[in-house]
Amino acid sequence: MTNINTEGLPPEMQARIADIIEKAKANAYQPPAPSAPTQPAPVPAQGLQNPGALAPRGPSLMDHIISLRVEVDTLRQQVNASAQVTEAVGQAVGQMYQMFQQQTEPSSYSAGFETAQPSQVDDF
C-alpha cells in the first residue's frame, strides 16, 4: 500500500486517501504478546463418543421420492389452474361472440341500402 500514486488527483482526494491508509495501518493485525503458559486442555478419551454425529447422512431414496411427489402435486395444481383460466377465457369469448351474433338489425347506415329493393323511378 506504500506505492500508491495519487499525483494526478485533487488535493482533497489525496488527503482522503492518505487518511484511509493511515487508519488501515493503525488497525493492522498485531500478533498477541506471549503471556503466561496455560494448562493444556484435557485429552479426550480414546474411541468414538457419538459415532452418528461424525458423518451426517444424506437424504434417503424415500426422501427424494416424497420430494418428487410434492413437486408433481404442485405441478398438477398449476396445470389445473391453467386449464380453468383457459376454460373461463373461452367462455367469455363465446359469450361476446353470441352477443354480437344476436344483432338482427342492420348496424350501419349502408346496411339499409343493401336490404332495400331497388326503386323503379330513380334516375341514374
Image (cartoon, rainbow, N blue to C red):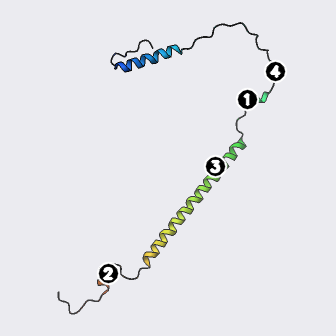
Q: How far apart are marks 4 and 1 (CA)?
A: 15 Å
Q: Compute the Cα span from label 4 to label 2.
A: 101 Å
In the displayed structure, does residue 104 sit left or right of residue 48?
left
Q: Name the residue under label 1.
A: 55
The x and y percentages for residue 92 are: 50, 69
Q: Earlier in the sequence, mark 3 or mark 4?
A: 4
Counting from the top left corner in percent of width and height, residue 123 is at: 17, 89
Please report the residue visible at 70 percent of the width from the left and 47 percent of the height from the top. 66
Q: Which residue is drawn at 41% across and 12% down?
A: 3
Reading the image, the residue beneath label 2 is 111
Q: Residues within 10 Å of mark 3 (few under 14, many from 20)?
A: few
Gap between marks 2 and 1, in whole Å? 86 Å
Give the spatial CA distance, label 1 vs label 3: 29 Å
Q: What residue type is labelled 2?
A: Ala
Q: Which amino acid does label 3 sit on?
A: Glu
Tell me if mark 1 has few (under 14), some (14-19) or many (20+) residues whose alpha carbon lies within 10 angstroms of its own: few
In the figure, is residue 123 to the left or right of 41? Answer: left
Relative to 54, is 61 above or below?
below
Q: What residue type is labelled 4?
A: Gly
Secondary structure beneath label 1: loop
In the picture, which quadrant includes the C terminus? Answer: bottom left
Q: What residue did someone put label 4 on? A: 47
Name the mark nearer the viewer: 4 or 2: 2
Q: Quadrant of residue 57?
A: top right
Disc 4 and disc 2 in contact, CB within 8 angstroms: no
Q: Do the residues labelled 4 and 1 touch (CB within 8 Å)?
A: no
Q: How many labels does the image show?
A: 4
Q: In this view, does 123 lie above or below 48?
A: below
Q: In this view, does 14 lie above or below 101?
A: above
Indicate which disc residue 71 carries: 3
Q: In which quarter of the image is the N terminus?
A: top left
State the separation of the CA atoms marked 3 and 2: 58 Å
